[in-house]
Amino acid sequence: MRLNHISVGGGVEVSSSLVEKIANRVQLQVSSELLSTYTKQLRKMLDYVDKIDELDEGSCNDFFSLVSCSAEREDAPVLYDGGVIVQQAPQRKGQAFQVPQVVD
């Protein structure tokens, strides 16, 4: 099965002028040193996309779902007695937990 897609890499000549045009479109100032680096990186990315495009998708199974085997429970709220919980705290201040200060 062939998925609908747009060919990205095929036929695109990646040059410094193309990368410079892209940089200008997004309002980036790129030095000539970075322009060379970005040109090489973009060329590598598009070459990789071309390799992915060559994959034989016919040998892959279509999408499938896994049967959920996790134990499910009803999501019901549990009410606790706040006073009992606070009494079990190592440090408390009145009816609240007391914790060490972490921000000045």
Image (cartoon, helix red, strand yellow):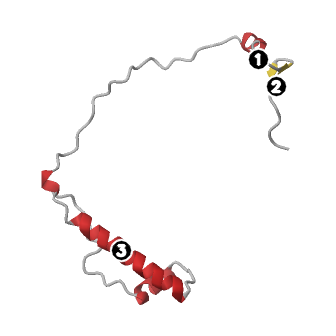
Q: Can you give x and y, in whole percent of width and height, for residue 98 in the image? A: 82, 25
Mark 1 / mark 3, whichever is N-terminal: 3
What is the three-letter code of the residue carrying label 2?
Answer: Gln
Query: What residue does disc 3 label?
Result: 44
For residue 35, side relative to residue 59 (left or right) = right
Q: Quadrant of residue 5?
A: bottom left
Query: What residue does disc 2 label?
Result: 98
Where is 98 relative to 33, above or below?
Answer: above
Q: Nearer the viewer, residue 53 or 41?
A: 41
Residues at discs 1 and 3 in contact (Cβ within 8 Å): no
Q: Which numbered disc, 3 or 2, marks the residue closer to the eye?
A: 3
What is the three-letter code of the residue carrying label 1?
Answer: Ala
Q: Can you give x and y, in whole percent of width and height, for residue 40 in the image? A: 40, 80
Instruction: Answer few, some or many: residues within 10 Å of disc 1's Cα (few below 14, many 20 plus, some between 14 and 19).
Output: few
Mark 3 / mark 2, whichever is N-terminal: 3
Distance from Cα at disc 3 to Cα at disc 2: 56 Å
Distance from Cα at disc 1 to Cα at disc 3: 58 Å
Residues at discs 2 and 1 in contact (Cβ within 8 Å): yes
Q: Nearer the viewer, residue 34 or 30?
A: 34
